[in-house]
Image: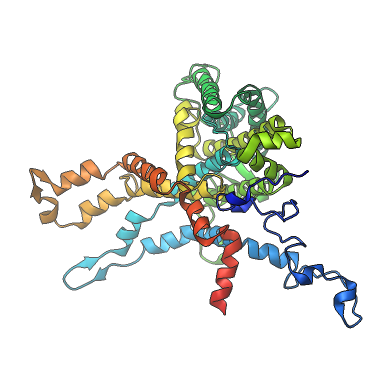
Amino acid sequence: MAISPTRDGDRSHDPDAADSTSSGTATDGGTESASSAGPDATADEGDLGDGATATAESPLAENGWVRRYLREHTAHALVIAFFAIYPPLYGVLLRLPGIDLGVASFAPAAFFDAFLPGTTFVISMLFLGLFAMSFDFISGYTGYLSFGHAAFYGIGAYFIVLVANGDVPFLPEGTPFVITMLLGAILAFLAALAIGAVSFRLTGVYFAMITLGFAQVLYELIRNWGYVAANPQEGPNLGGPTPEIGVPYVDSLSVALGRLAGDSFENVLGLGIDVSATLTSYYAIGLVVVCCYFAMQRIIHSPFGRVMIAIRENEERARAVGYNVFWYKMAAFGFSGFFAAIAGALFAAYSGAASPDTTFYFLVTADALIVAIIGGLGTLAGPFFGSAFFEWLEDVLSSEQGGLAPYLREGLPESVLEADVGGVSFLEVINGAVDGRSQLYLGIVFVLFVLFVPNGLLGSVRDRIGGPVAKRLPDYLDRYRR
């Protein structure tokens, strides 16, 4: 007897991980099985008709695995390409000249500065996106909500800082960042196994509460432990060499992270293009996030991932078939903690510090939960898009770097700003209801998503087009090419 990890009626809920053949053997990443590929796929040598013999199909043929793989990842390539060109495109938009409309003038640069997120906000989106994807890895694909996921994020962040400051035995200050990051992730993996060994004795809300309890214990420990910092409530600052992403011990293949201390490049390839330290960190961190995303996706599309989904859909049935669901849940929890620690390490390396309130605090997990629900639980990429929405809203409603409030204050005439309605001027409305109110409006948006878009952004798109975007997009593009 075999078990299909997802029920037929649930294909719209998680189609990316629910493709299986009629015989019960799951296909991987959307690759068609022989039983569903049509007559040509099942033809034997005697069916070739004119004496031809069957030969191995070329990988580059129309139906070869290379061409098929590229088609299935068209959506991924487009998203990566967009984020790759976004910083230079953003810079071009900010340099657009003003337009004289006769009766008034329009400044495109100010408009884009107000309504497009700056590069630093996009970098924050990368940290949060990776952390939210690691949260979705366990919560969206096994159905176990981990309310204490910030513990693993904090372990990754603090481990980076403590090693850089020479406070971890047997690891000198000059230990390459990539090695330290992986060691911190392994430590988080082991911590997840230790927490999971106790927590997975429970289910439902009890599991969520006990993971939250463990995280709060670590939070209180860190913010009162004088070994980690002179002022543990503020947290340690990053000392020692600037963290570098690349090949360990090969300086030519590594770049330093940090908004101020990171590497910058002038006149790249003689093209007159300058790459700032912020931009260097953006691309280096983005590369790590992409690698982590594909690693998680590969796990989800593996037989191990199918069992994760089977546990989410019907744990009792998975156990009855013969799976040791406890150890599958433990391994999934460990992998989730591993990638959460990598997100924390990137955060600490870029910001140059770590504190209990920005890493171990339970509201850090709440941010991951919010963006995962907005993007779509159980979609893996959905939390990434949810974090993009989160950071965009925070940037638009912030006064630190452009934003809607400064744009309105500087762009509207004095007569409009001083207009009095019920004893309150429009300028006071802007200052009180718009400026710095991102958390208020994000809460409202979150409530609306829970009520009216329960599957999130990506989940709703999948429901609309009848399957994963990565698999449906090539067919849509083929229609327009014809």
Residue 400's place in the image compared with 23, above or below, is above
Reply above or below: 149 against 390. Answer: above
User: Which quadrant of the figure has residue 308?
Assistant: top right
Q: Is residue 187 above or below residue 388?
A: above
Q: Nearer the viewer, residue 438 or 109?
A: 438
Number of marks in the rendered image: 0
Residue 103 versus residue 361: which sits nearer the camera? 361
Residue shown at 92% from the left, 81% from the top? 51
Please identify the quadrant where the N terminus is shown. Answer: top right
Residue at 8%, 48% in the rendered image: 420
Residue under the image location 21 percent in, 43 percent down: 431
x and y percent of residue 452 in the render? 39, 48
Q: Residue at x 45, y 21 (%)?
A: 233
Judge left or right: residue 185 versus residue 445: right
Looking at the image, residue 312 lies above or below residue 357: below
Residue 383: x, y in percent? 51, 46
Q: Quadrant of the C terminus?
A: bottom right
Q: Position of residue 425 (x, y in %)?
A: 12, 46
Is residue 80 at all visible to an observer of this figure?
Answer: yes
> Between 299 and 163, which is closer to the camera in this rendering?
299
The image quadrant that residue 345 belongs to is: top right
Query: Which residue in the rendered view is the most extreme toward the bottom?
Result: 50
Question: Residue 246 appears at what percent x and percent y?
Answer: 65, 47
In the rendered structure, the answer to whether residue 219 lies left or right of residue 43 reads left
Name the image colouring: rainbow
Residue 259 visible, this orientation: no
